[in-house]
Image (tube, helix red, strand yellow):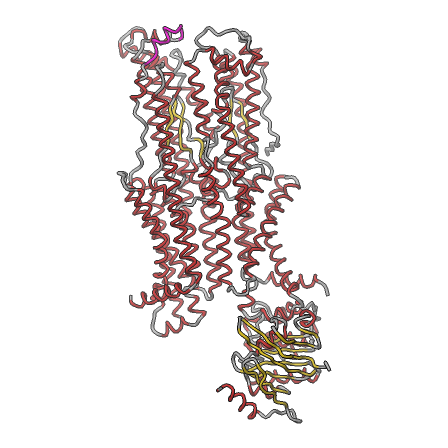
Amino acid sequence: MTNYALKASDLEVVRGGKTVLSGMSFEVKQGEVFALLGGNGAGKSTTLLTFMGLLQPKGGVAQVLGKSVAEQPDAVRNQIAYLPESAALYDHLTAWENLTYFLSLSQVQPASESLRAALDAVSLPIESRGRPLKSYSKGMRQKVAIALALLRETPVLLLDEPTSGLDPSAVEDFHDIIERLANNGVTVLMVTHDLYGACQAAHRVGILRAGQLVEVFEADADGNIEISTVRDLFLQQRVA
Amino acid sequence: MNMKYRIEQELFFLLKCRAVLGVLALLLVVSGVSVVLGLNYVAAERQQIAELVQLDNEERAYKRSLAYDYGGAAYDAFHAVWNPPSELAFAAIGQRDLNPTMMRIRALAIEGQIYETDSVNPELALAGRFDFAFVAAYLLPLVIIFVFYDLLASERESGRLNLLSVTARNSRILWLPRILLRFVGILVAILVPLWIGIFIEGAAFGLLFGASFAVTLLAVLWTGLVLAIATRPVLRSESIAAISIGAWVILTLAIPISGKVYIESSVSGVKGAEVALVQRESVNDAWDLPKSVTMDAFYASHPEWADSAPINEEFHWKWYYAFQQVGDESAAELSRDYRAIMLVRDELTARVSFLSPAVAIQRQLETLARTNLSASLEFEDQVRSYHEEIRRAYYPVLFSEEPFSSERLAQITIPGFSNSAQLAVE
Amino acid sequence: MGAIILIATDELRFWRRSKIAWTVLVTLLLVSTCAALVSNVEVSRRAEERLAQQAEADAIFQAQPDRHPHRMVHYGHYVYRAASPLAVIDSGIDSMVGTSIFLEGHRQNSATFAAARETGLLARFGSFSPAFVLQALAPLLLIICGFASVTREKENKTLYQLIGQGVSGNKLVFGKSLALWVVALLAILPLLFLGFSSTGSDNFGFRQSLYSMTFGYLIYLSVWVLLIVSVSALLRTSAQSLSVLLGLWIVTVVLMPRIASEYASASAPSPSQIETNLRIAETMRAGGDSHDIEDNAFVDLRSVTLAEYNVESIEDLPFNYRGFVALRGEEADTEVLKQFAQERMSQELRQKSIADSFSLFSPVVAIRSFSMALAGTALQDHHHFLRAAEDYRFNMVQTFNRLQMSEMTLAEDLARNDGDEAGRNTRVNSSNWAEMPVFELRPLDHTQRWGAASSSGFAMGLWLIVAFGLLLLSSRQLRS
């Protein structure tokens, strides 16, 4: 059965001589939001980079829509959009220019209506759209980066600490967008150390510790995850 | 979806990078200034040559009008020779300011005349010329370093690299247009002034192509080198800059200077001053030697005059010119050695140019512009054969001892000096 | 003061642990020591070569047989330019000018056969002398050491901690400058050692010049130290600081000297040698041909001389009148030659002073000129050699002319071509050649060298003030 959108089997990744991931396995179904929760150095970013094809696993396989990332990196990159932690875009370009430039990299020539629609979807104020990103707040930059991810219309979305440094209302907006995407069949993998955000947005939450997945919590029928249980485990392993 | 759109976007992106644009504009200006200075230099040289030719003709005609014997007429008759700048000389003035480019010669010993250079202000000469070859050899690599050193590091250090890599279908689509456009920008900035200069000078397409090709090759080499350093994932942008500048110092300063020290200390031999000294000694000694010694030596190399009447007087012009000729012959071997040594040094310089692209580009441009050593030696050959022509023109009247008549003198015509290269005077 | 030293030691400690700083330091010491050694060998080789050549020329000259004195006037003599002892530090224009001059009557030859032509293409790439290392490479290495001295603190946010702990902006930049200055001192040391050993026994004040020169380099490198720390304090990131400083280095070290000379030669062009030679020939023609006593130009001289000695004809004069005409003719010729030579030298000095005025745009132009002048390898030293050679030439020629006047009668001289016996009568004993004093160039003394260097020294003083002002300005910017 390979109807999983993302699949890690027995992943082992070594960075700078240190084993960061060892024997990690998980699957994410299509349209599912999966959050990996972990402390600093647990291997969260490494997992994402491996799925993006920017790190080569020493052992095991990372698969996106049935294709091995290591074997077909170009094909896989067409299927994934990525939202970096610090929403690193070009400061000297406007939102509009950033979107067109980045899309040209994936060889997409967007119509202005779709650009406008994407910026509307992330509710970026109209008066800011023509200004260079220098003048943007962190939340606004994040919105531009999300708009980019939306415009790429990829079936898989990878998020790196998506809500860190955002104010509560921006976090709320963000979760709405994720939910909408998931309802449209987009598969989302997010890594975060934001316990509450993860529990709120994800269908399943995995706890990552020292490069291994130690526990996975699944949402109940109402779509809720028992935060306290997750927190207990999370804190317990931090102390350890 | 095609590459054209991608390149359009990249061009737009480049136009928004003010630092890169600034450096390119600077290169354009500096290259333009070097071309203007070069054009002025060659224009001034041509002007000087034109004036020289004019003055030379007047002066010779005047001197001839005063002549009362053939020997004296030949003694006073200076003939201008010159090495006009080529159509590409403006781009690589090279050693032209230190080499003989124009002089006036007469039927006396050539070794005493041929090394006469125009006097340059040594302190100004020390700094070196600000010509296109300098811009290509020194500044082009620095501009390349500036434009490319943080190509990758700036994206990584600002956290954009991952997003860029994931968004681009592959790294070629991301980097190739970016590198290519910047590279083309650099080439355009440095070459356009050169092309304008070449157009003004009316140089052949081959020269334009040759010079542009050499500069492009240099740019490819340096871009490759800088990118090889800049794509090392462990280096921070400052380290990349420092290492690249270090490479520049080694390739454009340290290697040429070490090469120079090596060449100067390992190739020693005949100095120009020695050639002149030997020739002078020979000419001076002749005054005290029995005339037959000089004349026998002369007739040995010029048997066609061997039956000329013996000399009884204390002074005779034909004896005078004979010992000038013998003086040249006595220094001929040294003179050849002197040339040979310069050629050996040049050969070693060619080897240094394999280690230093700065030396290589200067050599290449000087070769194209005919401002190199071989062009200078070729000019020397032309002067020598012209000098021979002058001598041959006077020998018949001297050695057949015809009585002096201004009509006969007027029949002695020596065509003006002509170069293989065209002299264009505006 | 304590805080300044603390910051300086902290910076030095950082360098001790950084690979780049070590590389820079080792390179700097290695390069300047190598330059000192290579230069020492090179310069002493050249000096010996010239001494040998001069000795050979003197020997050949003295070995000339008995001759008519005027033949010796045309035979002439070679003089060689001895190298200054401080050429080991800065060889200046040494390779751009000829090392020897041929001296003869009626003519002033130029110093031909510059080494630069014989070396070829590579001559213009600079020389591996301590001066080049200090002027061009040391600033570059200081930049690589110091560009991040303050920006690093900003990027690591340690700057606010320092300021928070009460370290003032001034103390911070002074401390950083002090640390960088220690490196600059290290670079200068080999120069001092080398200069000290090569100026062991001289009495032309080269030791003093060495001290002034060292002081000049100290100021020059201090200017760079202050500029580097100021730029680092003014800008936000290390990358910006590095770009600006490298740009500054390229403009001041690589571009400015060339721009200065191009500008100088374009704004005060010198006439070509041929043109000058034609003008000289024309002027001298008016003075007459001193080989020919019947030349119209000497009619006055003849009547004045006859009247002075109260005799009827030149045969009755107590000396050989031909020699006398030669003597007076040479005087007149030399007058003309000197005038043209003076014109040429003033023109060259004018060009030099135009080029030197670029000192205001680049401290490198200032130190180049300053260092050459004190090393005794500048334009004025070359002119000094040319003048000395000209004086020697004049004395030599006049000595021969006087011999012609006193050692033979006019009748003998006029009959010199009438057979062997008559020729022998006009020959002068060869012992006279050996009596000619040999050419010895007395170099300019320290005061003269200092005088030539002072305006560049002044320019460097201005640079120091400007750099210091910039440092204070940048430290003020740190506080806010």
Considering only vertical position in the picture, is C243 above or below C404? below
Q: Position of residue B410 (x, y in %)?
A: 57, 14
Q: Which residues are magenta?
A: C417-428
Considering only vertical position in the picture, is A9 above or below B425? below
Question: Which residue is located at x 39 percent, y 36 percent?
Answer: C46
Q: Position of residue A121 (x, y in %)?
A: 66, 79
Question: Is B145 covered by the magenta stretch?
Answer: no
Locate the N terminus of chain A by quadrant.
Answer: bottom right
Q: Position of residue B49 (x, y in %)?
A: 54, 30
Q: Position of residue A232 (x, y in %)?
A: 53, 91
Question: Is C426 covered by the magenta stretch?
Answer: yes
Q: Is residue C231 visible?
A: yes
Considering only vertical position in the picture, is B200 above or below B169? above
Q: Locate residue C403: give its quadrant.
A: top left
Nearer to me, B233 or C86: B233
Question: Which residue is located at x 40 percent, y 73 percent?
Answer: C160
Nearer to me, B424 or B397: B397
Q: Is residue B11 visible?
A: no
Q: Locate residue C316: give its quadrant.
A: top left
How many numbered marks, from 0 up? 0
Considering only vertical position in the picture, is B260 above or below C314? below
Nearer to me, B291 or A172: B291
